[in-house]
Amino acid sequence: KRFFNTLETLKKEYNINTNDRVIVRLEVEYGEEIRNFRLSGKEWVKEYEDKSSIEDLSSPFKENVKDFLKAIDEAKKEVPKAKITYSISSTRRPYKRAVLMHYCHKVARNKITPQQAQIETQKENIPINWIHTDSSGNYSDKISRAKALDMVRAYNIAYPASLTSHHVRGNAIDITITWQSSFTIKDKTGEIHTIDTPRNGATNPDLRKVGKTYGVKRTLEKDPPHWSLEGN
């Protein structure tokens, strides 16, 4: 069994720069655990999947969403020809999923080393191995980063997931809302609004105003289905 007894040995073995301030661990502490971990790659997207039930949200946002959707349901009954539909794709995000989404992006974009990601995910008890080897058994930075990029693509993310996001805290919902003709809907105060074009929840400013009165806000243009307690 090999031991990494000095920083110089570890730097040479894994091409780690001293400026990275990587925590040095002996293989008995770091390697024996990693030996049984599953290698990083797109298969990890199936682990720690996002919840899609409103009941998984935190209060008071959970109640806010229920009230907002109740108003939409009432509008559907009153104006059936509008053919209003909504589909929930995500509510609460498990913290471990956010961790994987966060670090795969950083590794893929060369913001940190695979070894740094390894240390951070082991702290969270996630059995993933970011450190890939080539056919000769030598560490391969190229393969390690390529596998992280596969994860980025599988998660379909453009930036590192926040570890303290509204989704992680149960204060956000990804919901797609569409309709085919104008309809009216009551806001939280009882005021009636006419909703017409554009005919989707992502870009319609009038529906956003209604949602805001219920405490379900939308401001992120880059994340079309995203509504949250604070809008971001």
Image (tube, helix red, strand yellow):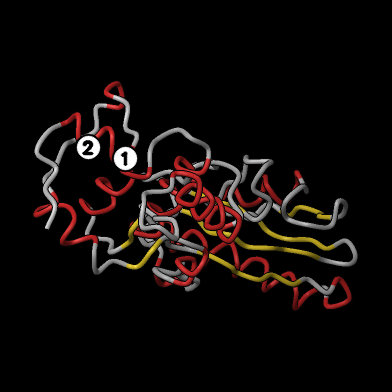
For the N terminus, the quadrant is bottom left
**Residue lying at 86% horizontally and 51% vertically, measured from the top left:** 198
Quarter of the image where one finds residue 13:
top left
Q: Which mark is residue 66?
A: none
Total number of numbered discs in the rendering? 2
Residue 113, horizontal then vertical, whole percent: 38, 38
Helix, strand or loop at label 2? It is helix
* Residue located beneath label 1 in the image: 14
Q: Is residue 207 above or below residue 154?
A: above
Mark 1 → mark 2, Cα distance in angstroms: 6 Å
Residue 94, horizontal then vertical, whole percent: 37, 62
Residue 4, horizontal then vertical, whole percent: 14, 42
Q: Which mark is residue 10?
A: 2
Say whether residue 115 is left or right of residue 174: left
> Local crowd at mark 1 within 10 Å, few (<14), some, or many (≥20)?
some
Disc 1 marks a residue whose amino acid type is: Tyr
Q: Is residue 159 above or below residue 20?
A: below
Q: Would you say the residues marked 1 and 2 are in contact, meaning their CB atoms lie under 8 Å apart?
A: yes
Disc 2 marks a residue whose amino acid type is: Leu
Nearer to the camera, 66 or 93: 93
**Residue lying at 43% horizontally and 48% vertically, measured from the top left:** 140
Helix, strand or loop at label 1? It is helix
Residue 142, horizontal then vertical, whole percent: 50, 45
**Residue lying at 18% horizontally and 61% vertically, measured from the top left:** 33
Say whether residue 128 is left or right of residue 25: right
